[in-house]
Amino acid sequence: MRLGCGFLNEPIYLSENYVNVLSIENKALFRRFVKAMMSGEPEEENFIFSKDFKPLSFKKNICFIYDCFNLSFSASFLKKVYEDMEDFCNNEMLDETFELKRIITNFIEKVTEEFDFDFTFKDEVALQDIFKIQNIRPDTESSDMLESLYEFIVLIQKYAPVQCFVILGIHQNFSSAELETFYKELIDRGIRLLDVESTTDFARGSLEKLTIIDEDLCEIVEKES
């Protein structure tokens, strides 16, 4: 998998065996890159993710994490979780599911009978609707912020076809020593991660490969070992 940019001589190879770090020291270019990622359509700014030399849809294949302090799940992700939970209930909790649907239907019928006008409602009770109403969602809150980030990434990968995670400024929040275990766990799971930084003012870890675009837009790439 690769990331091609107009300011790079060669695309960045995004590996499962190490974590890529892209440091953009040119502030204007850094802002442009981050804004393009946040828009969800970086292709319009000529930032292209590809696999086997074929462009990938950013929205379908890339997860951009721009705030480690505010991790949130999309509606489409939660829908897939609810579908999984509903399948489980229909297969592993058949009796309980049938009884719940019966109780809800009877309850609605009794409520509507108390009014002087007629109502219609769905004959079939959808468990996904119940899960949504109750705002069921994965709990990744932890006193360990890096653990929360790891759980968030693993959950996203489980329910969405994410090819690569792009994270903004992970070195601004964690030390290289803290990141070493985090990186190893992601690599063991075959999860690709690209960290985007605005400086090189951090200690590079042994599991990172660094690409630098300096203030003059000169490219410095760490060679493959």
Image (cartoon, grey):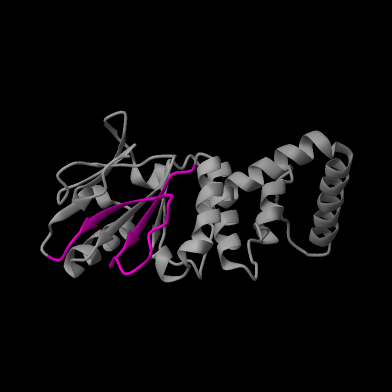
Q: Nearer the viewer, residue 128 or 178?
A: 178
Q: In the rendering, at what x and y percent does residue 67 appear?
A: 44, 67
State yes or no: residue 208 in magenta: yes
Residue at 59% over, 49% down: 155
Q: How many marks?
A: 0
Q: Position of residue 29 (x, y in %)?
A: 18, 63
Is any part of residue 74 visible from this angle?
Answer: no
Q: Which quarter of the figure has residue 65?
A: bottom left
Q: Is residue 1 above or below residue 70?
A: above
Residue 8 image point, x, y percent: 17, 48
For the C terminus, the image quarter is top left
Q: Residue at x 67, y 52 (%)?
A: 129
Which residue is at 32% across, 69% downward?
201
Q: Residue furthest front?
A: 225
Q: Position of residue 169 (x, y in %)?
A: 38, 65
Question: If the image is split into quadrants, where does the N terminus sit?
Answer: top left
Q: Nearer the viewer, residue 200 or 48?
A: 200
In this picture, residue 195 sits left or right of residue 161: left
Instruction: Name the side, left or right, on which 139 lies relative to 99.
Output: left
Front-lying residue, 113 or 7: 7
Does 158 appear above or below 208? Answer: above
Residue 134, can we see it?
A: yes
Closer to us: 96 or 77: 77
Q: Which residues are magenta?
A: 191-215
Left or right of residue 137: residue 57:
left
Res 138 → quadrant: bottom right
Residue at 42% in and 64% down: 170
Q: Is residue 72 left or right of residue 166?
A: right
